[in-house]
Structures are given as C-alpha cells and as structure tokens.
Image: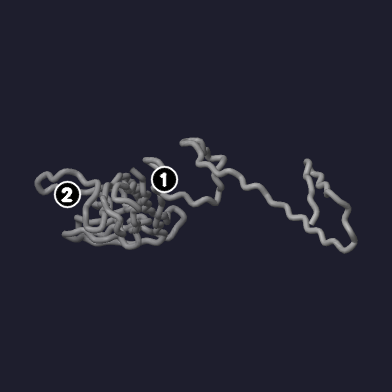
Amino acid sequence: GKAYTATGTALTLSAATASTDTMYCVFLGRALQTVNPATNSINNAMVSSSAAIATSKLGAGAIAQVLSTTKTDTTSVTQASTYADISGMSVSITPSATSSKILCLVSCYPSTQSGYNLMIRLLRDSTNLCIGDASSSRNQTSGHIHPNSDYDIIPTTINFLDTPSSTSALSYKLQWRQTDDTTAYLNRTYNDADNIYRPRLASTITVMEVLA
C-alpha cells in the first residue's frame, strides 16, 4: 500500500500508482452531536403538522376530543308520569383521564300544544345534569317550554361542564316529559300543516373533553 495525505478536498499519494494497483476511496461521514433541546425552546413552527402529540402533553383547558350527534328527523312523546329518552339525541365519549371535564352543548327544537308544558333534561348515563334544586312537587329539569301557539317551536339550549371523574365510556343524552294530556314533538311544530310555513329543523348534542 501507499501512504497518502489529505488536505481539504485533495488527496495526495506518496508515490505514483501502477496500472496493476486497485484504489478504493471511502468517505466516512462525521457523526453529528446529539443534544436535548433546552426547556421551552421548541415552538409551534418546529413541530411537524403530522406529528402525534400525546394528550398528556397538552396544556390545561385544551380540547382533547370532540364528538357530536345530529338528529334531522322528527320524533314525539305523549303524556307520561316519567321522563323518556329522546330518540337519536345521545352521544358517547371516553375521557382520556379521570381529571378531564366534559363540556356538553345541546341545541334542540321542541314544540307542544299551545298553553301546555314540556320538560327536557340532560343526563350522563342515569345521572341528571344541569337541573334545579328540589322544591316540593316542582319539576327538576334542564329545560322547559310553554308555547303560546300551536305554530311555535321553542329553541332550547343547554350548556353544562361536567366532572365525571372517569375514563370509562360515558353516554350523554336528552330525555323529555310531556306533563299534560297532549303530544310534544322535536324538529317540527305541533301544528304540522303541509305548507312552506311549517319548518323542519335539526337538533344536536355535542361533547368535548377538556383537559385539566
């Protein structure tokens, strides 16, 4: 073999090569030094848009997941002594941590006969949420309508921040109770004549996991 010297990009052999010589040139890349970045030195611009970030790394108040159900058809309920589930008005969520809260947003469009009363309430599984205090025989409920016309739909909203302390699957749903001898409806008017003045609407129930 022949000795060589390297200067910059030049490689100089100590003697001339012969036609019978075989020469191999192998470049060995230099390893780059790896370091741990300083605390708080990484900003949003440095994070890939496709990067998966664990929910445990998100700050307090961050939204970990959003789930929603939209009901576009109609349904009804008649007079009853107890509450009944509103068909199609439920949504399930599984919190990622027991410390998480669940923000529940409800927007629905009930109607009933003029001068009659309809009660609506929000539940997590079988637990009543966002209801008033007990007061004698008064109805503990999350919402109530008493229309002045058979043509009225009363938009009803319920906003509630729940603390379930669970990582199990949870079902949030609406129930209703028609307290008078008549029929109540969802997403339509009580008087549902077939003309352009009678609407069809969509009701929604949405849940969001809010990290602690």
Q: Earlier in the sequence, mark 2 or mark 1?
A: 1
Q: Is residue 17 left or right of residue 207?
A: right
Residue 109 appears anywhere in the view: no
Furthest residue toward right: 19
Q: Report the residue marked by disc 1.
A: 57
Task: Look at the image and tell me in which quarter the N terminus lies.
Answer: bottom right
Name the residue located 51 percent from the left edge and 39 percent from the top edge.
Answer: 37
Q: Amino acid at mark 1?
A: Lys
Whole-percent x and y of residue 130? Answer: 24, 46
Depicted 9 relative to depicted 91: above or below? above
Which residue is nearer to you in this view: 63 or 36? 36
Dot in front, 2 or 1: 1
**Residue 41 placement (x, y as % from top left):** 51, 36
Residue bearing mark 2: 139
Q: Residue at position x 34%, y 46% from top?
A: 103
Q: Secondary structure at mark 1?
A: helix
CA separation, marks 2 and 1?
43 Å
Q: Whole-percent x and y of residue 163?
A: 27, 47
At x 87%, y 63%, the residue is 20
- Amino acid found under the numbered disc labelled 2: Asn
Q: Which mark is residue 8?
A: none
| Residue at 55%, 51% in the rendered image | 50
